[in-house]
Amino acid sequence: MTAAAWAFLALAAVCAAFGLWQWAARRRTLRRLNGMLDRAIAGGFAEDRFDETELSALEGKLARFLRGSAHVQKTVEREQAAVKALIADISHQTRTPISNLLLYGSLLSESSLPPQQQEQARAIMIQGEKLSFLIQTLVKASRLETGIVVPSPSRHRVDALLEEAAGQEEQAAQKKEITLRVIPFDGSAAFDPRWTGEALGNVVNNAVKYTPAGGTVTICAQMLDGFCRVDVTDSGPGIPEGEQGEIFNRFYRGVGTRAAGGLGLGLYLAREILTLQGGYIKVSSSPGKGSTFSLYLPREANRI
């Protein structure tokens, strides 16, 4: 065998040995990284390598990250506890004053007062009811946001949901001579009846509120691949494109709707309720052509 052949074999052996060493080193590094992540997930991670290697530096960074995350988590938990306490205090402390305000306003309205004072008593009742509604809605929103209450979706028939939402607004629709109709539907979806009923009720309430006298509001549903879509279509003034991305924000009131009653919380609550159940809400609208709000309910409850 020639010297060149021997040199080639020696070089090949060195390359093979170097490759084997790299493979073994990579395997050791991966095993160590895997062990670090396992300890981090289990909450028992601690630095145990103090040298100049990259792994030691990585352990130090991971330890600092986990300590920071734990601090942030404790801060969030303290803030959530403070919010829960504040919500409970607001709900408790305002219940009696508002009830008394409504009670005495009602008594004044029923008593023999001059016309001007009768009107003032009615104004007290209206403002008291608005205040009561505002407090109740804010408490609901806060409880959803902080996880004090969480919707529990399970399989239910959708037709009952549609009929209940229409029934709640039937009187208001009749007063404005609005045709409120529900298209028959046979099917089920996964939702929390109480909370989803509130979400749909808020949407139907808005549709009736902003549809002019003599108009039409239609509630219907259809099955899609993964969702049941509930549509609420009105013949109202429609929503400008520039406002459609804002109407689901808390307290947002469109330029053309500020004269009507409302707090700007109904659509925000509807979005929060649906999101917590794995669904969502969309709007399709053009000025002068009415609006369609589509609520997407998962067909099956998400299993976590």
Image (cartoon, rainbow, N blue to C red):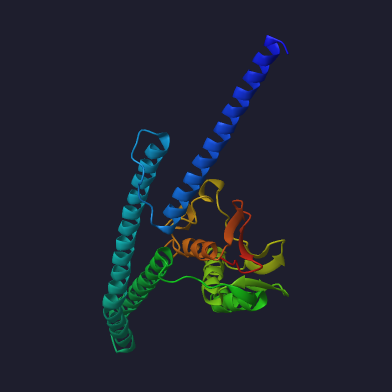
Q: Position of residue 290 (x, y in %)?
A: 62, 57
Q: Quadrant of the N terminus?
A: top right
Instruction: Look at 28% across and 65% down and name the residue there.
Output: 82
Residue 237, x across and y down, in percent:
57, 56
The foreground one among 25 and 288 is 25
Residue 299 picture quarter: bottom right
- Kindly indicate the quadrant of the structure image that contains residue 185: bottom right
**Is 258 drawn above or below residue 301 in the view shown?**
above
- Residue 184, given in percent of the width and then of the height, sits at 72, 75
Horizontal side, residue 240 vs residue 289: left or right: left
Q: Is residue 17 left or right of residue 77?
A: right
- Vertical relation: 168 (above or below) 14: below
Farthest-out residue, bottom: 111
**Farthest residue toward the top?**
3
Q: From this viewpoint, which residue is outermost toward the front?
A: 1
Residue 174 at least partly seen: no
Q: Which residue is depicted at the point 49% across and 57% down? A: 248
Q: Nearer the viewer, residue 137 or 232?
A: 137
Task: Give the residue displayed 33% in from the left and 63% down from the top.
Answer: 80
Quarter assignment of residue 261: bottom left
* Picture quarter with the C terminus: bottom right
Of 147 and 104, the residue lying toward us:
147
Number of marks: 0
Residue 176 image point, x, y percent: 56, 72
Q: Is residue 228 visible?
A: yes
